[in-house]
Amino acid sequence: MIEIINSPSSFDGEEIIVRGYLRIRNESRALFLSKSLAEGRLTENSIWAQESENTIYGGSIGQGADSIHELESYDGKYVLIRGVFDAADRGHGGAFAGTIHVNKVVNMLEGYNSK
């Protein structure tokens, strides 16, 4: 994720898999490197997460799914996201490093998640 934030144009149009802390708020739906960066609202060091009607939730990154059917269900959790990166789309207000168009999201670090 650090490489993507530092050089977004290098990943433009590529399918990527990134891990981070997902924070969903009124004007923010972003993947941060850590919970502390999310709490500090350092959006330039985060990636906007855009879901679609085809987004798959849960299971493993390779296959399967569970019954959670919205990105908001992963708020405040460390997740693994697979999707296509768009360097030109910088999210709400142009404040993010780019956008990942989410194909799949998985809760990866259950023991580290805030409840």
Image: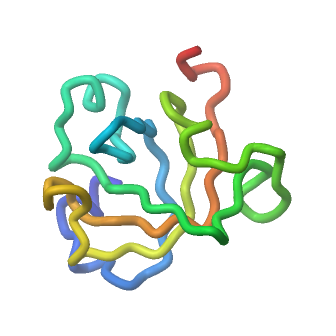
Could you tell me which residue is drawn at 76 percent across and 64 percent down? 62
Image position, residue 71 (x, y; %)? 57, 47
Q: What residue appears at the point 19 percent right and 26 percent down from the top-left corner? A: 40
Position of the C terminus, as image quadrant, is: top right
The quarter of the picture where residue 73 lies is: top right
Which residue is drawn at the image coordinates 45% and 39% (left, top)? 22
> In the drawing, does residue 64 fall left or right of residue 96?
right
- Toward the viewer: 69 or 6? 69
Decide which of 45, 93 is in the foreground and name it: 93
Viewer-closest of 76 and 34: 76
How many numbered discs sit on the rendered protein? 0
* Figure check: 35 above or below 89: above
Q: x, y percentage for residue 109?
A: 62, 31
Q: Quadrant of residue 39?
A: top left
Q: Position of residue 14 (x, y in %)?
A: 42, 81
Q: Is residue 44 above or below residue 91?
A: above
